[in-house]
Amino acid sequence: MKETVKAEENEVFDIELNIDILKANQKLAEENRKLLQKNGIKAIDIMGAIGAGKTSLIEKLVKALKNKYRIVAFKGDLTTTIDAEQIARHGVEVVPINTGKECHLDANLVKKALQRLDLTKIDLLFIENVGNLICPAEFPLGSQKRIVVISVTEGPYMVIKHPFIFTDADVAVINKIDLAKAMQVDIKKLEKDVKAINPNAQVAFTNCRTGEGINTVIEALRL
Ligand code: MG
Ligand code: ZN
């Protein structure tokens, strides 16, 4: 595992959204996108609430794909490296990114993490955002595809209550489907809610503990 990227005091863009901050982030995201493209790296970022299963999804994707691609993962968290260590156990390089007090990753921190690596030796990059359903949507990172992970334990209204995170998502992963009945959540209704917000989003149903449905995520990502 690489040394943790740490946000300096006042470095992370402030949570109070103003247009200039978003514009500055957008510009850096474009730079990241170009840099990744130039090096032939496919980057995918994963957003979702705390406990939705973002880390478990990455672990299962890494397991399924690590013989096919040279994989690196970035893991955004406030101060811990618990998830980063969990992913690193699968034998891939991980760069932990600690945001300090901020509730989302931004393109600047991703740029700093990219500087830690030899980009010519990477095919596939997973970026796990801080657990949050709101502001990550406003901060593109320069990835080619964005995934939102939803778990049925978040209840039946999770999608309609947080529409903006789905508007730019390429794939919505509905996780913990084994618990749907106990939670009295209709997963087909969640899918409909996603499609109503973003008809282009692909929807996959998973149990990231067992690996059920992981292949449909891989297909949706065209990996
Ligand atoms: Mg996690
Ligand atoms: Zn935030």
Image: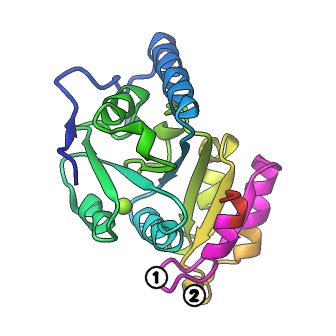
Contact check, label 2 and label 1, Cβ < 8 Å: yes
Question: Which of the marked residues, 2 or 1, is nearer the chain's N terminus?
Answer: 2
Mark 2: is the Cβ under 8 angstroms from ligand 1?
no
Kind of residue at badge 2: Asp
Foreground of the two, 118 or 176: 118
Position of 29 with respect to 217 (left or right) is left
Q: Write the residue at 56% across / 25% down.
A: 34
Q: From which residue to which does the magenta span run?
A: 191-218
* Residue bearing the label numbered 1: 209
Magenta stretch encompasses residue 213: yes
Position in image of residue 219 (x %, y %): 71, 65
Picture coordinates of residue 129 (x, y %)? 41, 47
Q: Which residue is mark 2?
A: 178
Spot occupied by residue 144 in the image (x, y as percentages of width and height)? 62, 40
Frontmost residue, 184 versus 56: 56
Q: What residue do we see at 39% from left, 23% from top?
A: 16
